[in-house]
Amino acid sequence: MLRRTQPESHPHLTNRSDLKDIDNRDPEVRKALAKAVRDACINVGFLYVKNHGIPEGTIENALSASKEFFSLPLEKKMELDIRKTANFKGYNPVLSSNNDPLNRGDLHEGFEFGWEELHAREYDEKRAHDDGVMAGANVWPSEPAGFREATLGYYHAAVDLGRKLFPLFALALDLPEHFFDDKTKNSAAIMRVLHYPPQTGPVDDRVIGIGAHTDFECFTILWQEPGIQALQVLNKQGRWIDAPPIPGTLVVNLGDQFARWTNDIFKSTVHRAINRSGVRRYSIPLFFGTDYDVKLEPIPSCVSPERPPKHDVVTAGEYVQERLKATYGH
């Protein structure tokens, strides 16, 4: 059972990586960057990245559209209720998910979607990525105008960043730089835009912004609204550590698929969000996973007599489906 202790006011996470050389073709420069990433992956599972390449205007457009959408009347948003879909895409209202079984529900609302060409107005089976359990067309609200274009614009920028991160993670594991290429040809990339109402009451209240959990996929690219503290990470001592937004950075946190692939050498760290700012809080996570037909079996170099396999082998799609059903109750 997770310890429900008061969060530490200090120290907050200090693992930061500068991605200005992420496109540098000098192998020594890239190895140096991967080495900086490696420490955070092994010891924390969270890191901040700057010079990530996503234009500020792209972020602002997605944020503005999200605020407009969440300001719509509830009955309008409920037309796209995620609980009525088979592929977990659409609108999820406040308390519709529950990431921590010890809680009563997650105090946030969100809108969830997957791969779609930015300039394609209709779903194309031939060009769509194989999203496994989430396969099928996205659903989009009729208002606000421009919501689809603004959020998809950010989505594709974040996906481009995610593709550049996989080689760094391979190098951080002392693997060939292109080790993950054949396992991520149609990577399932799912994005959510989220709104957290202000949270009141004691820290251990059983209804919080999002309950303690680990993410399902390989890694998450998270934009946090500046100036509003909500994200917390559980450290090795079982204490909650604030992970505040740092201007000009994104948070990258590792998920369960990487943990299973690396036999827990890479950490999939427990985290939660509690918005006690007194104002609304918005965030945009993009969950980047492997192809759904890939088996999550440990990389040979991550297994030894002293470190036997720790997880049953399942496909990525089977694992994500199991976790989604547990979260949304269907």
Image (spheres, rainbow, N blue to C red):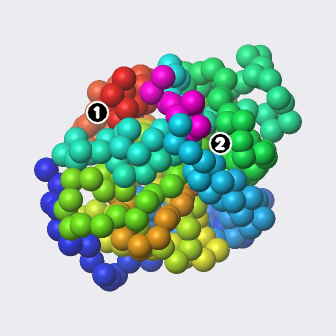
10 on left or right of 158: left
Q: Quadrant of residue 114?
A: top right
| Position of residue 200 measured from the top left corner of the image (x, y, whole percent) | 30, 67
Identify the residue at horizontal 31%, vertical 81% (top origin).
Answer: 9
- Alpha carbon distance from label 1 to label 2: 25 Å
Examine the rendering and report whether any part of residue 177 can be seen. Answer: no
Q: Which residues are magenta?
A: 76-84
Image quadrant occupied by the C terminus? top left
Q: Which mark is residue 39?
A: none
Crowd class of label 2 (few under 14; some 14 to 19; many from 20; radius 10 Å): some
Crowd class of label 1 (few under 14; some 14 to 19; many from 20; radius 10 Å): some
Front residue of this view, candidates 213 and 311: 213
Residue 295 vertical placement versus 290 (above, below): above
Of helix, strand and loop, which mostly describes the magenta segment?
helix
Residue pointed to by mark 1:
311
| Position of residue 132 measured from the top left corner of the image (x, y, whole percent) | 55, 21
Badge 1 or badge 2: first in the primary sequence: 2
275 on left or right of 247: left
Residue pointed to by mark 2:
178
Identify the residue at horizontal 56%, vertical 74% (top origin).
Answer: 226
Residue 313 vertical placement versus 209 (above, below): above
Identify the residue at horizontal 74%, vertical 67% (top origin).
Answer: 56
Identify the residue at horizontal 30%, vertical 45% (top origin).
Answer: 105
Reply yes or no: does residue 82 show up in magenta. yes
Secondary structure of the residue carrying tag 1 is loop
